[in-house]
Image (cartoon, rainbow, N blue to C red):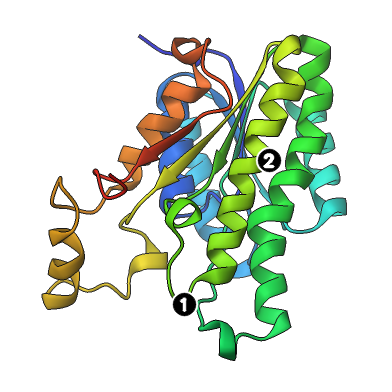
């Protein structure tokens, strides 16, 4: 059973990691996918991902676009509407971390994280709700983090950005529920991606895994499965919620 047959989905920051896993999962379930990457070094990988998706029998297109830039978000969504005709699902996945103790954190480091992690969610959501309101249907999925709920030493900017996403998600859900547009957030814990590659196997990784009731880090597919549920009609009565996908770490 394909849960997203002929739906049009947008995923930001999808050339690798969680975003790549979401794009592949959506395509597997019949969605046509438009996704973004930001650096020239990711262009080849993004192109290969597009070809892999199209081999599944659905349409795919990669766009070089910085989610932390309002004008680029506007241009990207307009291009998607011209190419695909509609936006049914938007996953705001683009994100970075620049960890540092507050005492040592520069204003530039703070601004970079807030711009990419939080401002981008506003920029993209503002663009996609227009066609969604016209269609009176849509699902917006914002990638938060358990750090946004618990905080973490050395991650004040990251925690603030991810906490802001939660408040934004709940507010948008209340604003747009009457138009049958749902907005939810996912709060992953440790996920095996480039962003957590510094946690190598061994004593360091074992220490973190010991604090997780399920005893392992999440895979990208674990998070993609939650995204699929929130994008599909199976979650048609769920909005304004934060689903913690952390293996029990936040209990």
Tell me the quarter of the image containing the C terminus: top left
Q: Is residue 18 left or right of residue 111?
A: left
Task: Tell me the element at label 1.
Answer: loop
Q: Position of residue 130 (x, y in %)?
A: 84, 25
**In the image: residue 93, left or right of residue 129:** left
Depth order, front residue of 109/92:
109
Question: Residue 73: horizontal and vertical position, in percent?
Answer: 79, 47
169 w.r.t. 123: above or below = above
Q: Hey, which quadrant is residue 124 in on the image?
A: top right
Residues under labels 2 and 1: Cα distance? 23 Å
Q: Give SS at disc 2.
A: helix
Residue at mark 2: 168
Residue at position x 53%, y 10% from top?
A: 236
Q: Earlier in the sequence, mark 2 or mark 1?
A: 1
Left or right: where 190 falls relative to 184: left
Residue named by callout 1: 154
Looking at the image, residue 106 lies above or below residue 172: below
Position of residue 228 in the picture relative to residue 117 (left or right): left
């Amino acid at each position: 059973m394909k849960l997203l047959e002929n739906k049009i989905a947008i995923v930001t920051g999808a050339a690798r990691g969680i975003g790549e896993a979401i794009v592949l999962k959506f395509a597997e379930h019949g969605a046509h996918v438009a996704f973004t990457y930001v650096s020239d070094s990711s262009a080849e990988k993004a192109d290969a991902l597009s070809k892999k998706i199209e081999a599944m029998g659905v349409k795919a297109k990669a766009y070089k676009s910085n989610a932390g830039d309002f004008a680029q978000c506007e241009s990207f969504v307009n291009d998607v509407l011209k190419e695909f005709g509609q936006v049914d699902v938007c996953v705001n996945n683009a994100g970075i971390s620049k960890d540092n103790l507050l005492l040592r954190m520069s204003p530039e480091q703070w601004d970079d994280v807030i711009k990419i992690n939080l401002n981008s969610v506003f920029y993209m959501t503002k663009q996609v709700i227009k066609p969604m309101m016209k269609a009176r249907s849509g699902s917006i999925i914002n990638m938060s983090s358990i750090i946004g709920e618990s905080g973490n030493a050395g991650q004040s900017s990251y925690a603030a950005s991810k906490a802001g996403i939660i408040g934004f998600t709940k507010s948008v859900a209340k604003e747009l529920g009457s138009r049958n547009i749902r907005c939810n957030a996912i709060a992953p814990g440790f996920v095996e991606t480039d962003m957590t590659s510094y946690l190598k196997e061994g004593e360091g990784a074992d220490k973190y895994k010991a604090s997780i009731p399920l005893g392992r880090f999440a895979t990208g597919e674990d998070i993609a499965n939650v995204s699929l549920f929130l994008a599909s009609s199976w979650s048609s009565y769920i909005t304004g919620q934060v689903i913690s996908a952390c293996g029990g770490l936040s209990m």
